[in-house]
Amino acid sequence: MELTATHTRIEPAILYLGTPVVLISTVNPDGTPNLAPMSSAFWLGWRGILGMAARSQTVRNLLRTGECVLNLPSDALAPAVDRLAMTTGTTPVPQWKHDRGYRYEPDKFGTSGLHPVESETVAPPRVSECPVAMEAVLEAAHPLAEGDKDLEGNIVVLEVRVQRVWAHDEIRLAGTTNRIDPNLWRPLIMSFQHFYGLGPRTTPSTLANIPETAYLSPDVARSHT
Ligand SMILES: Cc1cc2nc3c(=O)[nH]c(=O)nc-3n(C[C@H](O)[C@H](O)[C@H](O)COP(=O)(O)O)c2cc1C
């Protein structure tokens, strides 16, 4: 490691330092499916925490129906995800998006070239090509920067509870029933608006001495009812 490395204070306009891309499917008021890429997402137990523009069609649909599917594309699906960039299911296109070149797109699946498959517990479809797809219901919506006159109302933080996890057999850990093999799962990562994959596993992980089952959430049993 470089001992003399120094930090320089910087003020980057965005802090998109690398997070997995999620394609969220929801249902529009007319019953058609919407599909939107996002990457401000992380997981706590069987809950997903999602940061979304409050005026996106995805948020409107989620607040209205309480249902979504979180589809996780592999890095190989970057071209399909990119075909959804700069599109919205909202018409008319909100001013901020209009000014940046976004267009209204009612046929997100057709545009992406991806295919819908019927879900088991929610109305929005899964994306067939995504190696991981999680059916989920909305549990809470928290406004970001509440009380800040410049920021409030722009972004909402959604807490969703997962009800079904679907995985392609190609990424499952051999000899197990409920595990994904991290050597085979190649998530698509967005870093500073560009697409990346993961490199190979590096240093052996001390944390990985804890068995995955030690983290089992009561939400898993709840999803059976
Ligand atoms: C790779 C990628 C990552 C994105 N991440 C987010 C995000 O985390 N949150 C968000 O609100 N929008 C994000 N966007 C922009 C949304 O896709 C955009 O707001 C889109 O218009 C939403 O579609 P909808 O209005 O049909 O829901 C991302 C776009 C791309 C291409």
Image: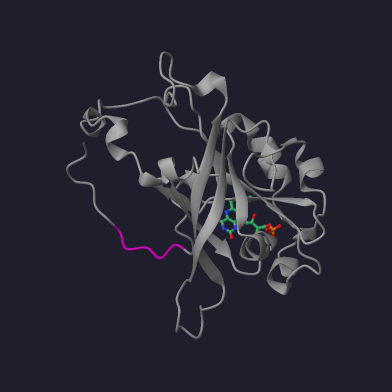
Task: In the displayed orientation, state which residue is furthest to the front.
Answer: 225
Task: In the displayed orientation, state which residue is furthest to the top.
Answer: 175
Q: Position of residue 111 (x, y in %)?
A: 80, 43
In which quarter of the view is residue 169 placed?
top right
Quarter of the figure with the N terminus:
top left
In which quarter of the view is residue 117 placed?
top right
Does the rendering let one see residue 124?
yes
| Residue span colored magenta | 8-12
| 60 with respect to 20 (left or right) | right
Q: Nearer the viewer, residue 49 or 91?
A: 49
Q: Nearer the viewer, residue 88 or 219?
A: 219
Is 31 inside the magenta-drawn segment?
A: no
Is 9 inside the magenta-drawn segment?
A: yes
| 176 with respect to 77 (left or right) | left
Image region (quadrant) for ligand 1: bottom right
Q: Residue at x 31, y 32 (%)?
A: 213
| 148, above or below 43, in the image | below
In which quarter of the view is residue 29 placed?
bottom right
| 106 with respect to 47 (left or right) | right
Count of numbered circles on the image? 0
Q: Position of residue 19 (x, y in %)?
A: 47, 46
| 144 with respect to 65 (left or right) | left
